[in-house]
Image (tube, helix red, strand yellow):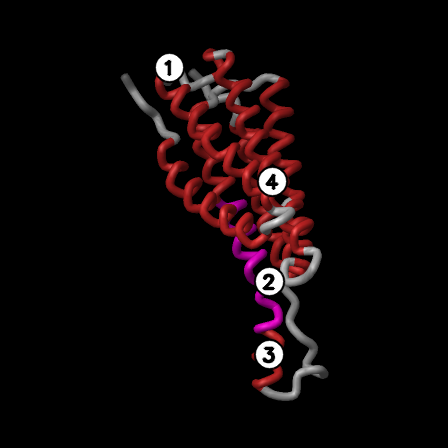
Amino acid sequence: MEKETVRIENFSDAVFAIAITLLVLDLHAPSAATIKNGTELLSFLKGEWTTYLAFTLSFFSIFIMWVNHHKIFKQIYSRNTAIMFANGLILFLVTAVSYPTALLARFFDGEASNIAVAIYTGIFVLINVSYNLLWFIASHNKKLLRPEITNSAIIKIRNNYLYGLPTYLIAFGISFQYPTIALAISMLLLVFWAVSSGKIKMIHE
């Protein structure tokens, strides 16, 4: 069976690359006119810790999303309009990650941290939903999938994406009162996705 999703995957790879590159735009070096010595430079760098935290979290989040996107399209061989729009939703949300990242960098260490974290965790709730939607559409018609894929593999992939959704919702829900804990949950979810991405593979009965 000839794979029909090559153009979708190539376009998606380009969007992921742009989205991950946009994150670096929020990293700013201080002006040489305002920094007189190494002590002042170190003080400036320490003050930017929220920026580095937000950048690191979002970089690896997008990277792991790209890995999972690659894995899921190993299983999708054909495309229809619904798949193209579901994939478009994923790409739209991925490109939007840079904005909540900027909010997190600027407001996490202040009184507005709960709203900044809520927006940040909220977008990952939507991204998780979009991945579930893509796989639901693809697996609803087995003719769209890799010819050798088994029913057990389809269920395992579905469950893999469903497992993350309640945790994302918990992180979003508690972010209004406990933003630091919510962000810590987001970090743990990065580890979960890094490990679980290896489980999306060809499984034969």
Q: Mark 4 belongs to which amino acid?
A: Gly
Q: Which mark is residue 50?
A: 2
Query: Distance between the Cα atoms at labels 1 and 3?
Result: 57 Å
Decide: is 195 above or below 2: below
* Label 3 neighbour load within 10 Å: few <14, some 14-19, many 20+: few
Q: CA distance from mark 2 to mark 4?
A: 22 Å
The Cα atoms of the two marked residues, 2 and 1, are separated by 44 Å
Sequence-earlier tag: 1 or 3: 3
Query: In terms of sequence position, does the residue under pointer 3 or pointer 2 come before the other?
Result: 3
Say which amino acid is labelled 2. Answer: Thr
Label 3 and label 2: CA atoms lie apart by: 14 Å
N-terminal-most mark, 4 or 1: 1
Check if mark 2's residue and mark 4's residue have beta carbons within 8 Å: no
Give the labeled residue for mark 4.
Answer: 173
Q: Which residue is mark 3?
A: 43
Asked whether 111 or 27 is in front, the reply is 111
Magenta residues, start to end? 46-63
Q: Kindly report the secondary structure that dominates the magenta region of the rendered protein.
A: helix
Residue type indicated by callout 3: Ser
User: SS at mark 1?
Assistant: helix
* Residue pictured at 47% horizontal, 11% vertical: 143
> Which callout, 3 or 4, points to the residue nearer the camera?
4
Within 10 Å of the Cα at label 4, are there few (<14), some (14-19), or many (20+) other Cα atoms?
A: some
- Labelled pair 3, 4 in contact (Cβ < 8 Å): no
Mark 1 residue type: Asn
Which quarter of the image is occupied by the N terminus?
A: top left
Would you say the residues marked 1 and 3 are in contact, meaning their CB atoms lie under 8 Å apart? no
Mark whose residue sits in front, 2 or 1: 2
Closer to viewer: mark 2 or mark 4: 4
Question: Can residue 25 be seen at all in this image of the molecule?
Answer: no
Residue 122 percent coordinates (x, y): 63, 40
Give x and y (percent) for residue 183: 54, 50
